Image: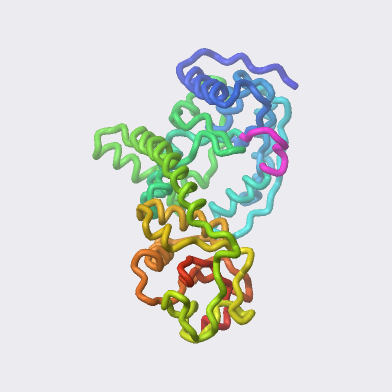
Amino acid sequence: MTPPVRLPETGAVLAVRRAVRDWVDAHGGPMPVVVGLSGGADSLALVAAAVVEVGEVWVVVVDHQLQDGSAEVAERAAAQARALGCASALVMSVEVGREGGPEAAARAARYAALESVRGDRPVLLGHTLDDQAETVLLGLARGSGGRSIQGMAAWNAPWGRPLLGVRRAETRQMCADLGIEPWDDPHNVDPAYTRVRLRTEVLPLLEDVLGGGVAKALARTAEQLRDDGAVLDRLTADLLRAATLPQSDAGPAPEPGRATGDAELPVGPRAGQPTEGDGGRHNSDRPALSIEILATADPALRRRAIRAWLTAQGVGRLLNAHLQAIDELVSEWRGRGGVAVAGGSRDHRLVVAREHGTLTVRAQPRNDAT
């Protein structure tokens, strides 16, 4: 292990060190950590500060193998980390899939690699205030509620982000002050990526039109929304516990082609269809929710509870339109059938339906959708 580099006391170095120290103090004091290093200025500055402020730092450089020369870039970054005094610097090569697009697929592969080697150590990532502002804008554009504009959390176990209050310009200046040349990923200036256009076009325009301070304001908004969201999450959990029915209370499934006990139509896209390919039996391992309790709850909490419940049932990629339609099964039901959602299998799809005064998730054979 190389002794830590003595860091100059410049403004940029002190800002980054202070951010890392504050994060460590807020999470129990010095501890062994893993730092995810790309070779860029943000993560290099984080490594340098962490070695001094944390002490025992393992560095992992993930080579996504998406560009020519990526192996050399990764080895160079690992060598820079060793020179800064980290305990270990490991290069991991990964295969990047295609699901969700290139950015999402690369991120999934990177996080999986870090998770596989971290042991019980937290992983520190070099996201800055500028990254936070871009994330908030992307969430705002999706229009999927307050959660989507809460941005990134400073701690979401096992992922830590000590630099969310640090500007990107400060990490670059810190590298310059240390005489370290960071790697500039060409993807970070490629306008084919939405985030790059936000960074190079949208945010500078907003700063100009609104007189500056936009990135800080967006990051501050995200922090306030996370605080609000924590309270809402607790209230949502209380509602979900109250509304979740024991398995035995869910009642029998309706007979094919007949209305349920509270005059609801049969579940499914067509009248006369059972809810499952097994003759309409209940999925005994899927809890149901009480319509009565949900209907009397505040709409905002009800929708959050439904979303959390569906996530626990394996429903993925829930669009706002799906959530609105499911909420209407509770609050404005007019005899409609179920709502198909993502998360089934090759042979079955998942359908959320109202029956016997409960909200249920059912598996239906996919050939029933035709």
Q: Position of residue 274 (x, y in %)?
A: 55, 81
**Which corner quadrant of the image does residue 283 belong to?**
bottom right
The reply to whether residue 69 is visible in this rendering is no
Residue 54 vertical placement versus 230 (above, below): above
Residue 345 vertical placement versus 245 (above, below): below
Q: What's the residue at 44%, 45% (across, down)? A: 235
The range drawn in magenta is 115-123
Camera-side residue: 241 or 197? Answer: 241
Q: What's the residue at 72%, 20% (across, down)? A: 2
Position of 345 compared to 139: left or right? right
Position of 128 compared to 281: left or right? left
Residue 186 vertical placement versus 279 (above, below): above
Q: What's the residue at 46%, 44% (across, down)? A: 233
Q: Position of residue 93 (x, y in %)?
A: 70, 46
Camera-side residue: 122 or 170? Answer: 122
Residue 50 among those drawn in magenta: no
The reply to whether residue 8 is visible in this rendering is yes
**Which corner quadrant of the image does residue 129 belong to?**
top left
**Which corner quadrant of the image does residue 85 belong to?**
top right
* Total tally of numbered discs in the picture: 0
Camera-side residue: 120 or 82? Answer: 120
Q: Position of residue 182 (x, y in %)?
A: 56, 32
Residue 246 vertical placement versus 252 (above, below): above
Residue 122 among those drawn in magenta: yes
Q: Position of residue 270 (x, y in %)?
A: 47, 84
